[in-house]
């Protein structure tokens, strides 16, 4: 008679290597630090929401005795809200579009042509992102005065696009490097020119990267206060980042409730763009499907 077979034992994970999964241990100091860090971000937002609903809001964070929308109704005028938001939209969209076009045209030769000057040039471009805008505003203001370009929206858009161009070139070149050159070579064999291949092959494959660059520049221009404050003088051309100072009166008087309501409405376009970025981040930038095709 044969001996009965022994029942096999299921080996728990990690036992074969001599390691067992221990109980989860929380780190109290780390949790406290994270809670404090989260409170530093949430408390100003809490004041913003509560003050926008309080007709008698102050600098203190408090629950309004009677919540209402009086502050939102007070700023819902063309002069206080609509015109500044429209100026911000024109300024930010124009800056992002001009920057994106220039970045694509500048990044294409840097990505496709190899030269000993490519790396030094790219580091020079990266160095341009480190220059503070305040260091060049005095000569730029003098130049705008001599050319009679003060209070000109197109001139301000071009200048802001020039300041955002170094980082945009660096980002666009990295996205363009991910597009295989073999796809362009196949288009060249079919008789397409370089610009045709760039427009029909490269740009569609890197449209998600172009969207990231566009949103990055748009958000920077949307929150830029210093450049429009110096170059755009009339209230009719000032964006919302500058017109927000209209809620700060003389002798320390501040309309806190209207300021909070204006800030919430001012931040909505940026929040919408962040939602778009979050949805796009879930998709892959890999081009393996295009290469297999």
Image (cartoon, helix red, strand yellow):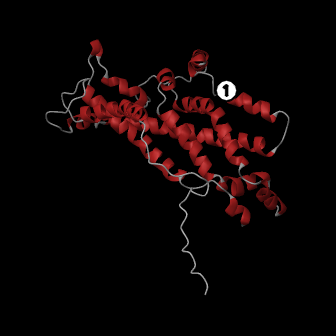
Q: Nearer the viewer, residue 85 or 56?
A: 56
Out of 199 and 55, give the one closest to the viewer. 55
Residue found 27% across the figure and 21% down from its top: 254
In the picture provided, is 86 more to the left or to the right than 179? left
Nearest to the observer: residue 228 or residue 37: 37
Query: 8 or 127: nearer the eye?
Result: 8
In the image, residue 114 lies at what x, y percent?
Answer: 83, 41
In the rendered image, which residue does mark 1 sit on?
128
Q: Residue furthest left?
A: 65
What residue lies at 80% left-to-right and 35% top-to-bottom? 118
The percent position of residue 145, horizontal first and vertical second, equals: 57, 17
Q: Residue at x 53, y 52 (%)?
A: 20
Picture coordinates of residue 87 (x, y %)? 44, 35
Residue 104 visible? The answer is no
Above or below residue 134? Residue 269 is: below
Q: Residues within 10 Å of mark 1 (few under 14, many from 20)?
A: some
Q: Where's the C terminus, which quadrant? A: bottom right
Q: Position of residue 43 (x, y in %)?
A: 32, 31
Name which quarter of the figure residue 104 lies in: top right
Total residue callouts: 1
């Amino acid at each position: 008679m044969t001996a009965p077979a022994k029942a096999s034992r299921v080996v728990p994970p990690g036992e074969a290597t001599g390691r067992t999964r221990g109980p989860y241990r929380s780190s109290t100091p780390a949790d406290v630090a994270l809670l404090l860090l989260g409170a530093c971000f949430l408390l100003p937002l809490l004041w913003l929401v509560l003050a926008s609903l309080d007709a008698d809001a102050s600098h203190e964070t408090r629950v309004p005795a009677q919540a209402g929308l009086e502050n939102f109704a007070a700023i819902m005028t063309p002069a206080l809200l609509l015109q500044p938001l429209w100026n911000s939209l024109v300024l930010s969209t124009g800056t992002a579009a001009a920057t994106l076009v220039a970045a694509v045209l500048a990044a294409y030769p840097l990505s496709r042509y190899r030269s000993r000057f490519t790396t030094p040039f790219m580091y020079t471009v990266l160095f341009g992102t480190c220059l503070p805008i305040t260091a060049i505003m005095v000569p730029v203001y003098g130049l705008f005065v001599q050319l009679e370009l003060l209070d000109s929206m197109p001139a301000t858009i071009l200048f802001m696009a020039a300041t955002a161009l170094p980082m945009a070139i660096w980002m666009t070149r990295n996205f363009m490097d991910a597009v295989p050159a073999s796809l362009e070579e196949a288009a060249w064999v079919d008789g397409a020119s370089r610009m045709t291949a760039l427009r029909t092959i490269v740009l569609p494959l890197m449209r998600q990267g172009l969207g990231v660059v566009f949103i990055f520049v748009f958000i920077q221009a949307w929150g830029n206060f210093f450049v429009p404050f110096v170059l755009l003088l009339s209230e009719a051309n000032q964006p919302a980042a500058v017109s927000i100072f209209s809620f700060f009166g003389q002798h320390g008087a501040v309309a806190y409730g209207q300021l909070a309501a204006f800030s919430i409405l001012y931040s909505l376009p940026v929040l919408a763009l962040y939602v778009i970025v979050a949805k796009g981040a879930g998709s892959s930038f890999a081009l393996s499907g295009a290469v297999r095709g």
